[in-house]
Image (cartoon, rainbow, N blue to C red):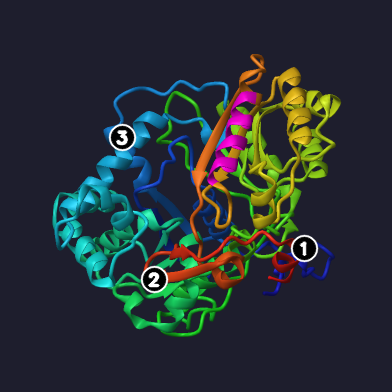
């Protein structure tokens, strides 16, 4: 585009800037239920909103997940010692999570046993017809009426995007899409988000995924989103990165200089967390159970210029800043701390490192760090060998000592049920971690204990036989694989070859 402001008149004075009168697109990015997330805006939609607005388009975010929870939560949440993503009313959210499963089950085309509710309605171990049928029933019932009322509060847009982060949102997203078609006929609908990225390959190979959905977007997509808005505004062909079901997928183009944009009007009193990123992709990226390298791409830093406006907005709203990076390495944590300088409280995720000593932790605390989440996963030698993530008990103890002395709260991610691991050893080392937390009364900590699941895009899922795993079934809308274990797999040389 020609910058007419750089032209000069004959006397050397600049010509007046001509306003940008190009057609603009009005869009809505929708977050469907059900995510156990309540404390603030979602990062992905905020980045899309920021990118679109910077290009002159109108982007509204309709967080149906938050609205659904807000209408049903029964007690006010008071912020605790853990800050960031884990600062939430967990008991209430778990109750609503169970209620969501029950709602989906009651709209399932066939009866669902109580012990299969989660696997069918959230994990999506179910057929395409079952999932489509449930979504259609939800859209035709009280849930659909509720969605309709939410949509009718928003002016008719030119484009709708749905942010689908995990499998538990799929049924709601399909139902919401049906209601969109009824309320706003002719408005195109595009899906993106981490779960869409996880399913990019099957979506590209089968048109069944395209019922009511005009396009899919894979990966971070700020630049592609703006290109799509530009195209819709003048009725041009869409960018190639927005693909239809049954056609080849192409990873979207991101813009790391984007400043996320938040609409905080609906957030009243109570804890507020604003998400931001300093990098994308995992700086470690070697875990055999993990999908981050496939979902997020290679590790790269993004523009630090995007951080300051978020920090300033957090100061203005007395909010906590949550760094959504998969892993902020120690040097990045120090850089972030030096930028924030204690102006706001913040949280981040990292991996154990010997640089997390008392001096470092005290400095980070002084710069505003209040919660550090670590991907410990396991202390069992065999399990560490299986997942390719060695971390010693000594390293953990040193980190916990430093965190306790500094006053930094910790969230410890721990994983059991790994293929080839000894169950008794896994439980022993989990108890060791619990004991290490318990013997430090000054330490503010929580252990996030999860059972292993076989992700389709993980190294284990991509090459299961190398880990003694046999995949027994794949489901169309799930990123998780059903499997069984044939043998233990602990030989380091074989694992390295895998």
Inter-mark Cα distance, 3 to 2: 30 Å
* In the image, residue 114 above or below residue 19: above
- Dot 3 or dot 1: first in sequence order is 1
Q: Is residue 301 left or right of residue 104?
A: right
Image quadrant where one finds the C terminus? bottom right
Contact check, label 1 and label 2, Cβ < 8 Å:
no
Q: Judge from the rendering whether residue 192 lies leftward or rightward of residue 348; answer left or right.
A: left
From the viewer's perspective, tell me whether residue 200 is left or right of residue 223: left
Give the dominant element type of the magenta stretch: helix, strand or loop: helix
Q: Position of residue 262 (x, y in %)?
A: 52, 44
User: Which residue is under mark 3?
Assistant: 95
Q: Is residue 1 above or below residue 421?
A: below
The residue that mark 2 highlights is: 473
Disc 1 packing (10 Å; few <14; some 14–19; many ≥20): few
Label of residue 358 in the image: none
Q: Secondary structure at mark 3?
A: helix
Q: Residue at x 41, y 41 (%)?
A: 36
- Image spot of residue 283 (x, y percent): 74, 54
Residue beneath disc 1: 14
Q: Nearer the viewer, residue 98 or 318?
A: 98
First-in-chain label (1 vs 2): 1
Q: Is residue 426 visible?
A: yes
Q: Nearer the viewer, residue 68 or 21?
A: 68
């Amino acid at each position: 585009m020609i910058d007419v402001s750089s032209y000069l008149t004959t006397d050397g004075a600049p010509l007046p800037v001509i306003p940008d009168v190009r057609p603009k697109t009005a869009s809505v990015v929708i977050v469907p239920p059900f995510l156990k997330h309540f404390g603030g805006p979602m990062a992905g939609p905020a980045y899309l909103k920021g990118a679109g607005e910077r290009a002159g388009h109108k982007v509204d975010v309709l967080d149906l997940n938050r609205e659904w929870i807000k209408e049903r939560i029964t007690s006010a949440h008071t912020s605790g010692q853990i800050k960031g993503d884990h600062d939430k009313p967990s008991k209430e959210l778990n109750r609503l999570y169970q209620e969501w499963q029950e709602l989906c089950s009651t709209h399932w085309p066939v009866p669902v046993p109580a012990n299969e509710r989660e696997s069918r309605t959230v994990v999506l171990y179910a057929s395409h017809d079952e999932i489509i049928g449930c979504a259609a029933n939800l859209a035709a019932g009280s849930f659909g009426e509720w969605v309709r009322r939410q949509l009718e509060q928003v002016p008719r847009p030119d484009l709708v995007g749905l942010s689908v982060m995990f499998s538990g949102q799929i049924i709601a997203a399909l139902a919401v899409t049906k209601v969109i078609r009824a309320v706003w006929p002719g408005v195109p609908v595009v899906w993106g988000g981490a779960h869409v990225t996880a399913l990019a390959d099957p979506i590209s190979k089968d048109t069944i995924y395209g019922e009511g959905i005009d396009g899919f977007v894979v990966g971070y997509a700020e630049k592609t989103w703006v290109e799509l808005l530009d195209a819709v505004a003048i009725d041009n062909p869409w960018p190639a990165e927005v693909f239809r079901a049954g056609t080849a997928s192409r990873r979207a183009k991101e813009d790391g200089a984007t400043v996320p944009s938040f609409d905080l009007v609906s957030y009243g009193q109570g804890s507020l967390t604003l998400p931001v990123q300093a990098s994308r992709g995992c700086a470690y990226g070697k875990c055999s159970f993990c999908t981050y390298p496939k979902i997020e791409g290679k590790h790269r830093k993004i523009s630090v210029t995007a951080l300051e406006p978020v920090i300033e907005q957090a100061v203005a709203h007395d909010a906590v800043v949550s760094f959504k990076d998969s892993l902020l390495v120690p040097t990045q944590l120090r850089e972030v701390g030096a930028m924030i300088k204690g102006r706001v409280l913040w949280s981040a995720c990292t991996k154990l490192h010997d640089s997390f000593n008392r001096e470092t932790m005290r400095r980070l605390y002084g710069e505003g760090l209040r919660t550090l989440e670590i991907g410990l996963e396991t202390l069992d030698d065999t399990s560490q060998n299986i997942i390719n993530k060695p971390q010693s008990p000594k390293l953990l103890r040193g980190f916990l000592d430093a965190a306790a002395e500094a006053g930094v709260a910790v969230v410890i991610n721990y994983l059991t049920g790994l293929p080839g691991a000894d169950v008794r050893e896994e439980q022993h080392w989990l108890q060791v971690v619990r004991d290490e937390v318990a013997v430090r009364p000054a330490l503010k900590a929580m252990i996030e204990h999860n059972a292993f699941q076989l992700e389709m895009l993980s190294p284990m899922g991509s090459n299961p036989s190398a880990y003694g795993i046999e995949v027994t079934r794949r489901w169309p809308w799930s990123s998780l694989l059903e499997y069984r274990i044939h043998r233990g797999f602990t030989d380091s040389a074989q694992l390295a070859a895998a």
